[in-house]
């Protein structure tokens, strides 16, 4: 069947795109190194038309986008929807940036100390996972989405009621590229990762604990090439220890929703703390979320 809609998950580091037939089934898929962090101001529309649409044979299709592309560093800032919010509230706030392109809004809530917290893209993954089964939409859920800025969502009966963000992935990238802890971040050393988890403690005194990533090499003879894995363990371990406590949900079962490699590392950290968990694929969820939103809007 011919494609009827182009949908994209356009985040800070990459863009995933699919064309869908009228039933919501995938016709074609492609991935692009076009994260919004790599785009010059005002460049999104041109790159979308010149690279994304031709690659998928989607020059004439309407498009529905989610993720950081709807932020103030993306195509255009789309107003956030306040929590609590579910599929209906999110779909109702989808905004057009031109006649053939619509962007899903992010969510906003009050986080630590009453400060504003925001997310974009994670709402579509959450909605997608919820849409996969009626059981998912019943009761209470704690959902962790690892990433550049990991998000911990509290979901009640199919609605995101609040969430808390972390800077884990971006801090790892900055320290790995621009500090004395620089490393290529490529090879994963499970033993060094475990050592980092142990060094994270309860997530407190992180600035002091971070220095152990330096001192273990300089003073204790650890292999310099293990620094990336140790640092990853330290940061993930601190996040996993601190965030459920900040949410008042220590020991709560956690759904890990995202990229398998990232979720597997978070699973090790959670298991070390005796936390029960479930795993779900992030790509399948965000695609399901885009389909659910498109159907409610009459685009499929």
Image: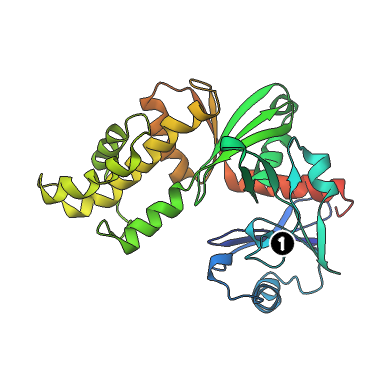
User: In the rendered image of this protein, does residue 9 appear above or below residue 241?
Assistant: below
Residue name at image x 79 percent, y 40 percent: 87
The answer to which of 290 and 75 lies nearer the viewer is 75
Query: Is residue 249 visible to us here?
Result: yes
User: In the rendered image of this protein, does residue 15 appear above or below residue 111?
Assistant: below
Task: Locate residue 177 relative to residue 221 in the image: left or right.
Answer: right
Q: How many labels were placed on the picture?
A: 1
Q: Position of residue 216 (x, y in %)?
A: 16, 45
Task: Locate residue 294 relative to residue 207 in the image: left or right.
Answer: right
Q: Position of residue 14 (x, y in %)?
A: 55, 62
Is label 1 in a helix, a strand or a loop? loop
Residue name at image x 73 percent, y 38 percent: 83
Q: In the current view of this chain or complex, which residue is farthest to the right?
A: 298
Q: Position of residue 2 (x, y in %)?
A: 81, 63
Residue name at image x 53 percent, y 70 percent: 38
The answer to which of 3 and 144 lies nearer the viewer is 144
Q: Position of residue 219 (x, y in %)?
A: 10, 47
Name the quadrant of the N terminus.
bottom right
Task: Locate residue 84 relative to residue 37 in the image: left or right.
Answer: right
Judging from the image, the colouring scheme is: rainbow
Q: Which image quarter: residue 257?
A: top right
Q: Residues within 10 Å of mark 1 (few under 14, many from 20)?
A: some
User: In the rendered image of this protein, does residue 23 appear above or below residue 239?
Assistant: below
Q: Which image quarter: residue 198?
A: top left
Query: Is residue 152 visible to us here?
Result: no
Residue on which disc 1 sits: 77
């Amino acid at each position: 069947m011919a494609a009827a809609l182009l949908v994209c998950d356009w985040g800070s580091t990459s863009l995933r795109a699919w064309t869908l037939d009228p039933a919501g089934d995938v016709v074609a898929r492609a991935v692009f190194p076009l994260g919004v962090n790599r785009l010059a101001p005002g460049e999104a529309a041109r790159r979308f038309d010149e690279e994304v649409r031709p690659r998928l044979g989607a020059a004439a299709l309407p498009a529905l986008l989610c993720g950081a592309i709807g932020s103030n560093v993306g195509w255009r800032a789309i107003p956030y929807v306040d929590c609590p919010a579910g599929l209906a509230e999110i779909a109702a706030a989808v905004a057009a940036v031109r006649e053939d392109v619509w962007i899903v809004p992010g969510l906003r809530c009050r986080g630590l100390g009453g400060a504003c917290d925001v997310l974009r893209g994670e709402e579509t993954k959450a909605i997608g996972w919820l849409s996969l089964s009626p059981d998912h939409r019943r009761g209470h859920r704690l959902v962790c989405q690892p990433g550049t800025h990991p998000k911990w969502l509290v979901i009640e009966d199919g609605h995101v009621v609040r969430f808390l963000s972390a800077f884990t992935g971006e801090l790892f990238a900055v320290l790995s590229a621009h500090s004395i802890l620089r490393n290529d971040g490529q090879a994963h050393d499970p033993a060094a990762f475990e050592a980092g988890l142990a060094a994270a403690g309860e997530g407190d005194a992180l600035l002091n604990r971070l220095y152990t990533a330096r001192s273990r090499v300089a003073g204790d003879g650890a292999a310099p090439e293990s620094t990336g894995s140790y640092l990853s363990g330290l940061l993930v371990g601190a996040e996993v220890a601190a965030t459920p406590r900040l949410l008042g949900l220590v020991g709560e079962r956690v759904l890990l929703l995202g990229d398998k490699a990232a979720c597997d590392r978070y699973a090790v950290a959670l298991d070390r703390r005796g936390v029960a968990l479930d795993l779900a694929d992030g790509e399948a969820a965000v695609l399901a979320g885009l389909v659910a939103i498109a159907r409610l809007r009459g685009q499929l």
